[in-house]
Image (cartoon, rainbow, N blue to C red):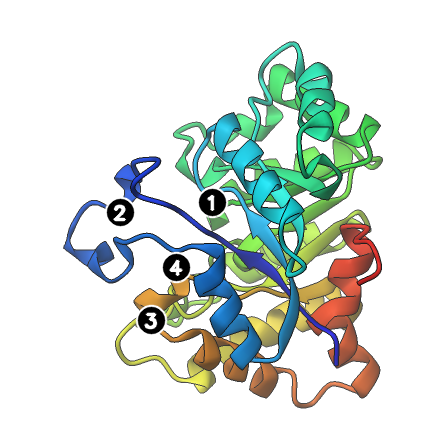
Amino acid sequence: MNTIDAHHHLWDLSRRAQPWLDGPRMAAIRRTFAVRDYAAVAAAAGVSRSILVQVLPDAQETREFLAVAAGSRLVAGVVGWLDLTAADVAQTLAGLREAPGGDRLVGVRHLVQGEPDPRWLCRADVRRGLRALADAGLCYDLLTLPHQLPAAIETVRALPQLTFVLDHLSKPPIASGRLEPWATLLRELAAEPNVYCKLSGMVTEADQDHWTVADLQRYAQTGFEAFGAHRLMFGSDWPVCLLAASYGQVVDAARELTAGLSPGERAAVFGATAARVYALAES
């Protein structure tokens, strides 16, 4: 199987501070993670291509990630960052595409989960920026918390021409064992055909020290029922996942969670959907 990891990160603490790593809870990942580190764990798990996703709201980081992709056979695409509220989104996108590795730009993400306004996605300036992404033929990765899903649903409906990819199932409250209201909102979002979803980020939403695959099962199953296997894609969320599990453990958990799917459905989750949605070049 040509496995694609649709969601991982890199960071170099000697080049750029990562304030979100402050505090004892993040100690396990408070170090530099380079593409060679990712390549080693990906190869061991049988992953052949990946999508590198922005970490900070920093356009220079995006340019650096594109350069990484240009020099890598592994990193097939980059989901970068730009200021969606700016008036010159189209020009900024054009500049990124002209940069080294610009042909690897497949989408944009903003850390909506950190916005204090739960309706940030509904702002007129944000919607204008999202329309520019659609005009450029790029995807938008949705990083939301459950309480932000109503605004996400409105936005997806307002922009049927834009393809959205929901990160981490919108971070369900796995550690608490609760499903609602997350599950109902997820199903409502999934009813819109221009939304896809990453089967990612679950281990860090569970009890990070004592999680089991069984703890993840109901949440993954909700995703399968809402989106269908052909609108889901596997993502490791490495190295953030290291707070709760090794790369191999995350891949193994995803394979166990998808064991009941047909071969075609598993092929979709582990590569075909990501390749199609992000329009990845043939490897």
| Residue occupying the point 68% across, 40% down | 107
Which of the labelled discs sits on residue 21, or is there none? 2
The percent position of residue 205, horizontal first and vertical second, equals: 39, 64
Residue at the (84%, 35%) spot, across then down: 161
Q: Is 78 positioned to the left or the right of 39 in the image?
A: right
- Secondary element at tag 1: helix
Please identify, in this view, whether the residue under mark 4 or under mark 1 is nearer the observer.
4
Judging from the image, what secondary structure is the residue with disc 3 in? loop
**At label 1, which amino acid type do we have?**
His
Mark sitting on residue 244: 3
| Tag nearer the camera, 3 or 2 | 2
Chain-order first, disc 2 or disc 4: 2
Under mark 2, the amino acid is Leu
Q: Which residue is mark 1?
A: 147
Q: Name the disc covering residue 6, or none.
A: none
Mark number for residue 240? 4
Q: CA distance from mark 1 to mark 2?
A: 24 Å
